[in-house]
Amino acid sequence: MAIAFDSNGPTFRHLEYKEYKEHRKPTPDDLVSQIPLMFDVIKAYGIPLFAIQGFEADDIIGTISKKVSMENIECTIITTDKDMDQLVDKYIKIFNPRKKQIRNIDRIRNEMGIEPKSFIDVLALSGDSSDNIPGVPGIGIKTALELIREWKSLENVLSNTDKVKGKKRQENLLKYAESARLSMRLATINTEVPLDYNLEGCRLTNVNNNKLNELFTAYGFNSFLAENHDNN
C-alpha cells in the first residue's frame, strides 16, 4: 500500500496553463490543520507516503501503478477521480469508495466503448470543468466519446473535421484545435515521476501499534482503538 498527496506550489501543468484549477477554492483551514494528524496516523501504520514538488498526487499514483503493472502484478487504485480511468489496464483497476464500484478494463470498454488510455483523448475534446481544462467549446463528454469511438484519437478527429457531423462542431474543432491539444497535455497523467519507490517497501510490515493506540486515544477514535486492540 502507498498513499500520495499533492505538494504545495505550482505543478508542471500550472506552468503550461496558468488557469489550471484556478477556480478552485482554497482548502478550508480546519482541514489544513488536520493534515499533519493524518500524516502521523499514516506513518504509524507504516504506509509509504509520497508528495513530490511540481507533480500532483495523480501523477505519483500513475507512476507507481504502472511500475507495478509492468511487473505483471495486480494493482488497485482507490479514488473517486474519473480521470484515473486512463491508467486502467490488464493489471490496474480502480475502486471508487463513494460508489463502492470496481472499474476494470472490461467495464470501461463496455461502458464507454473505448480503450481506457483513450479517455485522455475524450478529455482533450470535452475538457474538464473541475480542473478548468478548456477542451473544445460545444463538445461535451457524450459527443467526445462518440468522436473517439469513431476516429480513435484526438489527432484523427482533428485530421477529419470535414467528416464530422455539424457545421458548428467542425468550425469549433478547427478553431480550438490547439486548445484540444493543450487539454490533452493537461489531462494526461505523468507516469514517469522521479520518486524513490520499491514494491517491497509498500508491504505493511512496520505497523507501530503503540503509536496508533496513542493517536487513537488522543483523537477519540474509539472504534479504531478497539479494533487495534482486537488485532493484537
Image: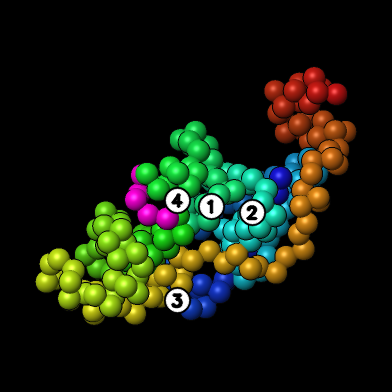
> Magenta stretch: residue 112 in it?
yes
Q: Which mark is residue 69?
A: 2
Amino acid type of the residue that numbered disc 4 sits on in the rendered structure: Lys
Q: Earlier in the sequence, mark 1 or mark 2?
A: 2
Instruction: Tell me the magenta residue range.
Output: 111-115
Q: Earlier in the sequence, mark 1 or mark 3?
A: 3
> Which residue sits at x=42%, y=55%?
115
Q: Which SS class for mark 3?
A: loop
Q: Which residue is mark 1?
A: 89
Q: Residues within 10 Å of mark 3 (few under 14, many from 20)?
A: some
Q: Which mark is residue 17?
A: 3
Q: Do callouts 1 and 2 mark residues in contact (Cβ within 8 Å)?
A: yes
**Distance of mark 2 from mark 4, alpha carbons?**
19 Å
Q: Earlier in the sequence, mark 1 or mark 4?
A: 4
Decide if residue 177 is on the left or right side of residue 199. Answer: left
Amino acid type of the residue that numbered disc 2 sits on in the rendered structure: Ser
Amino acid type of the residue that numbered disc 1 sits on in the rendered structure: Asp
